[in-house]
Image (tube, rainbow, N blue to C red):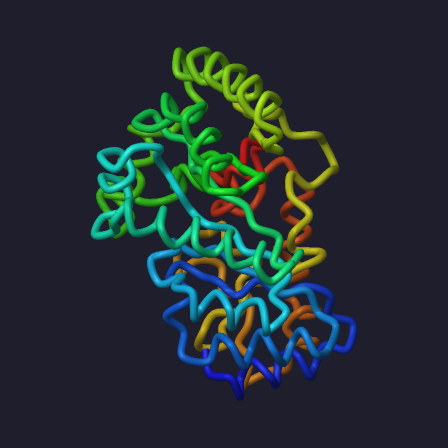
Amino acid sequence: MSFERFRAIVDALPDLETVTLQGLGEPLMAPDLFPMIEYASARGVRVGFNTNATLLTRAVGQRLIDAALDWLCVSVDGATAATYESIRDGASFAKVRRNLEGFAALMRERGATRPALSLVFVAMRRNVGELPDLVRFAAACGVTTVRVQNLSHSFSDTDPAGAYRDIREYAAAEALWDGDEVRAAERLFAEATDVAAALGVKLRLPELEVAAPVAGAPGCDWPWRSAYVRHDGKVQPCCMLMGGDRAILGELGTSDFTSVWDGDAYRAFRTALTTARPPDVCAGCSMYRGVF
């Protein structure tokens, strides 16, 4: 997304409170990232994002602090190089650790309390056994918050042989919300909780059992309080859809944000979320099912 488009969106929303600068790519590769942070922060808007920390050098870290970034989540999906690098293809566990330790040290040197720094761990069958060690890793790097989440989506709404086949099969093979995997994950969650308490690490854990829908209540409130704007201006209800061709509710450029937000497509989407048959794209969503 260009800075000009970003600025136009922010200017059109005088009551905007929070901006999360991420999609399905690495935010630190975005050419206009720092001007976006600075512009929104100057407006009093909270700004943050997730990063894989591969590009989190000391110079980048200094710019993030100076730009008044509010939070920074670093994705680390394993406590060993073998596991981490099998998931984060092309990344170096050693490099990420150096960058993470360096940024935490920089914040201490600067006496900076922002951005709030945390690790994000996507729990899967292949890595959940390393969660207690991941908590130890965080503490050793100087990070005192670890956020654990499940895979975002089952993709059960997609064609098993279609464009989403690979990610659908991956989710089926790795998700923790089925059968015996739940019991094993519960034991590891309990162990990680004990480790976190001993080391002074704040640990957020997801639910593992899918919640039963409540009649008349939406399984998710995101479409009432936030929106996901793609780089090209197309508007989707959230980032959990995991696909640029899913649930397009409007487009900036042909409409302004308020017109999209109050438009027929958004209204219909919200209404469907309050029924026993939500939009197909929501049915497999971990947020909707209460396991994110």
- Seen at 34% across and 28% down, the residue is 127
Look at the picture and state if 232 lies above or below 166.
Answer: below
Quarter of the rendering containing residue 220: top right
- In the image, 58: left or right of 213? left
Q: Which quadrant is the N terminus positioned in?
A: bottom left
Q: Position of residue 149 (x, y in %)?
A: 50, 36
Q: Position of residue 48 (x, y in %)?
A: 58, 61
Residue 192 in view: yes
Task: State the residue in front, 149 or 34.
Answer: 34
Residue at x-position 50% and y-position 53%: 105
Q: Quadrant of residue 131?
A: top left
Relative to 237, is 199 above or below? above
Q: Residue furthest right?
A: 15
What residue is shown at x 46% (from left), y 80% (from top)? 32
Residue 75 picture location, percent across and down: 42, 47
Quadrant of the frame with the C terminus: top right
Residue projecting furthest to the front: 109
